[in-house]
Image: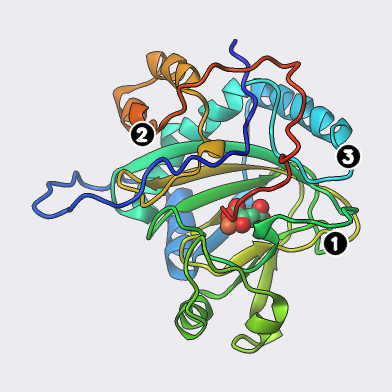
């Protein structure tokens, strides 16, 4: 198995978008009743949550990741793993998840990748942009599946968001630019009453499905306990921009492609988007910038 240490240097892998005129787009996939209901909620409100199942191998990877994150760089929020979480990566690439993403995004999708992270409750100077209100920049319509790995209540750093209409209003009134504008509570309170600030709680295994390109959102500051989670990222096949930290190195993606269906292969990141660097070993010391995550 290849080792995969996430680097925090962000690769502006893509910017701009090709014209979409005159394109033939395949019909969107059919879903079972439960997924249909999930996508309906996601389309209507920009967010939905439910519990998800993962297999034993993915659970083992989660246990290893949580142990690792619990003991590394314990004063800061960190978000990388020393080993490639192959089964977790495969969960994100599962056709059921691709179908959900495709139905919401309404175009062929790309599975950008994933990130496992811990948000520390006791962090003297949290610097992550994700703790400020923002919109993600990757695409006009996108999907993040954020799976909580421990029980998350309001003191444990839940995903927080404004409603979809208020997000649209906020975006216009505060000229909120995806991936560029980061707002504090005071600015948001000026346009959105606190009664319109929502957060998603849930026990370990709860997945938050959110269109983070349309909902003004943030990671609510954890006050009581650290929050562990894994985020899976999906865009259309023509994203505006991608962040390299979600994308495994090319060698890893190629190994996954070799064992994937044609449909899954089409959803993998294009080779030109991927890092071609040598994969570092598990013993690589942690990067001093590990906590400086971008907004996405
Ligand atoms: O992890 C979260 O609750 C949200 C962080 C964030 O801003 C994102 O993933 O886009
Ligand atoms: Fe975000």
> Left or right of 136: which side holds 182?
right
Q: Residue at x 80, y 34 (%)?
A: 69
Q: Residue at x 51, y 76 (%)?
A: 167
Query: Which residue was labeled with disc 1?
Result: 155
Give the distance between the C-alpha atoms of the residues marked 2 and 3, in whole angstroms. Answer: 35 Å
Query: Which residue was labeled with disc 2?
Result: 267
Point out the quarter of the image occupied by ligand 2: bottom right
Whether label 2 touches label 1, CB < 8 Å: no
Query: Which residue was labeled with disc 3?
Result: 74
Q: Residue at x 17, y 53 (%)?
A: 19
Report x, y in % for residue 157: 77, 58
Q: Residue at x 46, y 78 (%)?
A: 168
Q: Is residue 49 visible?
A: no
Report x, y in % for residue 296: 56, 52
Nearest to the eye among marks 1 and 3: give it.
3
Report x, y in % for residue 78: 75, 41
Give the distance between the C-alpha atoms of the residues marked 2 and 1, in whole angstroms. Answer: 36 Å
Asked which secondary structure carries label 2, the reply is helix
Report x, y in % for residue 198: 67, 72
Q: Earlier in the sequence, mark 2 or mark 1?
A: 1
Give the distance between the C-alpha atoms of the residues marked 1 and 3, in whole angstroms. Answer: 18 Å
Of residues 119 and 100, the one drawn nearer to the viewer in this rendering: 119
167 vs 47: above or below: below
């Amino acid at each position: 198995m290849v080792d995969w240490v996430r680097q925090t240097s962000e690769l502006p892998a893509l910017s701009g978008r090709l014209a979409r005129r005159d394109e033939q787009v395949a019909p969107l996939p059919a879903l079972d009743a439960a997924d249909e209901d999930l996508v309906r909620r996601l389309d209507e409100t920009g967010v939905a949550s439910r519990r998800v199942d993962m297999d034993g191998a993915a659970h083992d990877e989660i246990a290893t990741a949580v142990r690792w994150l619990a003991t590394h760089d314990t004063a800061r929020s960190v978000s990388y793993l020393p080993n490639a979480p192959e089964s977790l990566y495969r969960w994100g690439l599962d056709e059921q998840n691709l179908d959900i993403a495709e139905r919401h995004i309404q175009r062929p999708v790309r599975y950008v990748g994933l990130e496992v992270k811990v948000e520390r409750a006791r962090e003297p100077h949290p610097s992550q942009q994700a703790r400020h209100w923002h919109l993600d920049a990757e695409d006009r319509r996108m999907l993040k599946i954020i799976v909580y790995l421990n029980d998350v209540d309001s003191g444990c750093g839940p995903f927080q968001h404004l409603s979809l209409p208020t997000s649209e209003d906020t975006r216009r009134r505060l000229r909120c630019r995806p991936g560029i504008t980061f707002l504090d509570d005071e600015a948001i309170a000026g346009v959105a009453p606190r009664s319109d600030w929502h957060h998603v709680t849930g026990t370990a295994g709860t997945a938050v499905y959110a269109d983070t390109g349309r909902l003004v959102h943030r990671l609510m500051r954890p006050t009581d306990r650290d929050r562990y989670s894994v985020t899976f990222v999906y865009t259309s096949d023509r994203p505006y921009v991608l962040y390299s930290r979600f994308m495994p190195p090319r060698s890893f993606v190629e190994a996954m492609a070799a064992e994937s269906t044609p449909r899954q292969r089409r959803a993998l990141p294009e080779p030109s988007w991927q890092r071609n660097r040598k994969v570092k070993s598990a013993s690589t010391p942690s990067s001093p910038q590990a906590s400086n995550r971008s907004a996405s």
